[in-house]
Image (cartoon, rainbow, N blue to C red):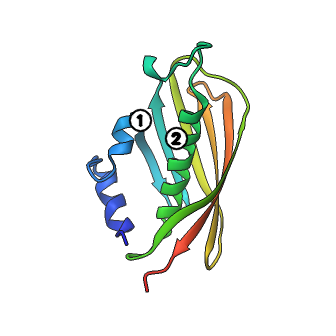
Amino acid sequence: MNDFPKYLERLRSGDTSTNPFLDFMGMILEQLADGYARFRMPVRKAFIQGSGVVQGGLIVAMASETIAHAVMTLLRPGEGIATIELKNNFLATAREGDLIAEGKVFKKGRTIIIGDCIVSSGSGKPLSRTTSSVLLLSAG
């Protein structure tokens, strides 16, 4: 199992080496608090699909990663997580600028954690809403 508290401390200090996916996506951590995470991701030309808008799967991946980080803020050393369900509703499209993802833990149970994320444009326009169910893997 990972030591997520230690991982988050490294991430807060700017070290993304333990999560290359953040660099791949260009996701920048803006804030972490108990049960909360916020990331920013500049839209790159490579993110635009054939109809001229950001490919939806990238928005969902951003939301999934943001929810996971919100969940990680509540974990103890040795605990792990695995996404068991993910649902997304697209609300609007984006073509340029920054995407902002804000993830929150809705409920933390003994074995299941439910998280929500809104991805918005840099101007605050909601682009998608994602809900995820995450399995809590015990330290023992």
Q: Amino acid at mark 1?
A: Met
- Residue 34 shows in the view: no
User: What residue appears at the point 57 percent right and 44 percent down from the top-left corner?
Assistant: 63
Q: Are marks 2 and 1 in contact (CB under 8 Å)?
A: yes
Q: Position of residue 137 (x, y in %)?
A: 50, 75
Question: Which disc number belongs to residue 62?
Answer: 2
Left or right position of 72 against 24: right
User: What is the C-alpha distance between the residues marked 2 and 1?
Assistant: 8 Å
State the image quarter where residue 91 is shown.
top right
Q: Nearer the viewer, residue 84 or 113?
A: 84
Residue 128 position (above or below residue 111): above
Left or right position of 46 against 66: left
User: What residue appears at the point 33 percent right and 52 percent down from the top-left corner?
Assistant: 11
Tag 2, which secondary structure? helix
Residue 25 position (above or below residue 136): above
Question: Which disc number belongs to residue 25?
Answer: 1
Q: Position of residue 99 (x, y in %)?
A: 53, 30
Residue 39 position (above or below residue 94): below
User: What residue appears at the point 34 percent right and 38 percent down from the top-left corner?
Assistant: 23
Residue 86 position (above or below residue 45): below
Local crowd size for mark 1, using a 10 Å CA cut-off: few (<14), some (14–19), many (≥20): some
Q: Position of residue 134 (x, y in %)?
A: 59, 64
